Image (cartoon, grey):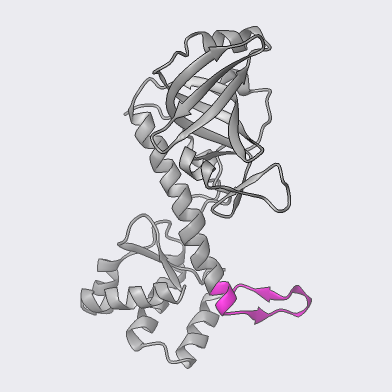
Amino acid sequence: MYASQFDGNAAFSGGGFMPSQATQTLDTGFSSAKNRDNQGLLPLTVKQISEASLSNDDKSNFVVDGVDVNNVTMVGRVMNRTERVTDIAFTLDDGTGRIECNRWVNEAVDSKEMEGIQDGMYVQIHGHLKGFQGKRHLVAFAVRPVTDFNEITCHFLECIYVHLYNTKVKAHMMSSVMNNPLQNGSKGYQAATPNQFSGQFGIDGLKDIDQKVLDHLQQPSNLGREKGVHRDELAQHLKIPLDKIMESIRSLEEEGLIYSTIDECHYKSTGNG
């Protein structure tokens, strides 16, 4: 096993597969970043950055998968390294595209960090995303050589995980809340509780098997399980054939009542608000 620079506990402070913010805290292994802008880092690819839109609230920020992006972490190959008086410019190629980067060298520690960075080398970058006249570039505040190529795979897995969380899991949560508004005086709408989900959809004619699956997933002991419940366990506990369980799972997913967690076999109820 290699020592990954990605701190999962810090990145996903919500615990398990429910991050409160899909961002990564600054890695203290980057000594030159200690006194820099101490904001969260989002693992991204060049393609995601090229397709990002500008935030309506803050024109200096970009939006990726509905999340405001400011500081990012990236992994790729250095190209076209050019030394200038106050900074070093280079292009980062991560296989999904290329982005222009520059690293200011105002201090001795900055110069020392960049001495070993050469064309063709794979690096991990922590930086601040900027845009000018429609073109995106990265102002790096830390650049570190990749010493284990597993780090490249790890970075792309992190990008995939955060993308799926921000697009799939959040969508299921929002769908369940929007489809089941419960008036709460001056506070407007709030998320439904497990019992309210079961009651309402039972009245609306939710299929008997669907209701059984949903009721089982909404049991307090199962709501508290980080990885959710395996589909085989559902079939065994409810004494229902697996093919029927899978039909029910697909139906409940479409309704936004459940979502998959670590894989397409483990499921949790969205009605745990």
- Closest to the observer: 173 or 230? 173
Question: Closer to the camera, 15 or 106?
Answer: 106
Q: Can residue 249 be seen in this snapshot? A: yes
Of all residues, the one furthest to the front in this rendering is: 133
Split into 4 quadrants, where in the image is the N terminus? top left
When asked about the image quadrant of residue 184, the answer is bottom right
56 with respect to 126 (left or right): right
The percent coordinates of residue 213 (x first, y second) are 36, 77
Instruction: Report the residue at 46% width, 66% height from top.
Output: 223
Locate residue 17, reporting x and y percent: 46, 53
Membership of 182 in magenta stretch: yes
Is residue 152 part of the magenta span, yes or no? no
**For residue 34, what is the image quadrant?**
top right
Report whether 217 appears left or right of 167.
Answer: left
Seen at 47% across and 54% down, the residue is 165
Image x and y of residue 174, in percent: 56, 68
Residue 252 in the image: x percent, y percent? Answer: 40, 76
Q: Residue at x 55, y 50 (%)?
A: 14
> Which residue occupies 47% across, 73% down?
256
Q: Is residue 16 visible?
A: no
Query: Which residues fall within the magenta stretch?
Result: 176-192
158 w.r.t. 110: above or below: below
Comparing 61 with 67, the one in front is 61
Q: The C terminus lies in which quarter of the figure?
A: bottom right
